[in-house]
Amino acid sequence: MKVFERVIYLTLVNRYQDILQRIHQSCQRANRSPDDLTLIAVTKYVTIEKTREVVQLGINDVGENRDKGFIEKKSALADDKLSWHFIGQMQTKKVKKVINDIDFFHALDRIALAEEINKRAVNVIKCFVQVNVSGEESKAGLAPSEVGSFIETLANYHNINVVGLMTMAPHTVEEPVLRAVFSQLRELRDFIQAQQYPNAPCRYLSMGMSNDFEIAIEEGATHIRVGSSLVGMEG
Ligand SMILES: *Cc1c(COP(=O)(O)O)cnc(C)c1O
């Protein structure tokens, strides 16, 4: 079934069970434990009410890509056990509005942004550096070859801790293409981790969305960001 057909026919609970099952199967194929994987429910398409239902399923990680949706949902669902992920591009001027409400920031991609985060953050912010592995012009993120020196520069910003790398795969169903993108990000993560930068433990890999999370898990994802196939597209 295509994603949009799933979205129409399955209820939220069914979709969640379906995704859990697919996560388990991917973990089995890759000989990994589902415990090492965080499922982030991306709620950007849906209302606060629907987001509440998602959280009631037992999901503790919520992702939003815009400051408005982020603030609305976080304040409506105030709950200590939830972790809030900001997964989208952030304008420098929006940083001070949201940065201290974020548990994980997935889209660090430039020094000017790092500088502003460092200035506005009250505590150390856990960040993923976004990498444009596929090299598509439309995509945000650093080129893989820029990541090492970027992280070295970040050493000056004490409120930033690089917990991992993030990428968005191209819109394609071609499995070898997706697999190559995800495995390149994993290799880059391994390389950065081996440098033992004090400001960049870089343990995590944020990769995989509705259409490609199974391949991402097989290639080592630790955080998958699943929107439409879990929460649906409306309401
Ligand atoms: C919207 C979005 C997702 C979720 O996409 P789906 O294909 O709906 O699962 C994941 N990551 C980012 C950065 C997004 O903007």
Image (tube, helix red, strand yellow):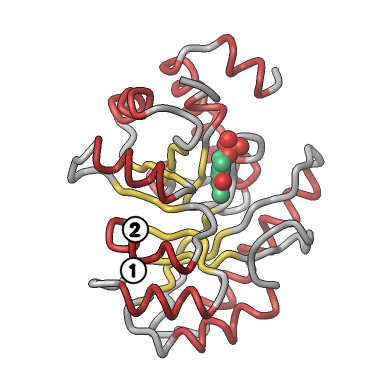
Q: Is residue 26 visible?
A: no
Q: Is residue 50 left or right of residue 107?
A: left
Amino acid residing under circle 1:
Ile
Residue in view at x 66 percent, y 15 percent: 5
| Residue 135 to residue 36: above or below | below
Secondary structure type for disc 1:
strand
| Residue 18 to residue 131: above or below | above
Frontmost residue, 118 versus 40: 118
| Residue tagged 2 | 98
Q: Is residue 17 left or right of residue 210?
A: left
Secondary structure type for disc 2:
helix
Residue in view at x 43 percent, y 41 percent: 39
Q: Tell me the quarter of the picture where residue 98 sits.
A: bottom left
Q: Nearer the viewer, mark 2 or mark 1?
A: 2
| Residue tagged 1 | 125
Residue 193, percent from left and from top: 50, 76
Q: Quick one: label 2, few (<14), some, or many (20+) residues within 10 Å?
A: some
Q: Is residue 115 visible?
A: yes
Q: Earlier in the sequence, mark 2 or mark 1?
A: 2
Residue 147, percent from left and from top: 61, 78
Residue in view at x 28 percent, y 62 percent: 100
Amino acid residing under circle 2:
Val
Q: Is mark 1 within 8 Å of ligand 1?
A: no
| Residue 162 to residue 158: above or below | above
Residue 220, percent from left and from top: 56, 54
Q: Which residue reaches farthest top?
A: 9
Q: What is the spatial separation of the Cα atoms under label 2 and label 1, in whole angstroms?
A: 12 Å
In the picture, which quadrant includes the N terminus? top right
Q: Quick one: label 1, few (<14), some, or many (20+) residues within 10 Å?
A: many
Q: Is residue 8 left or right of residue 137?
A: left
Ligand 1, by image quadrant, is top right
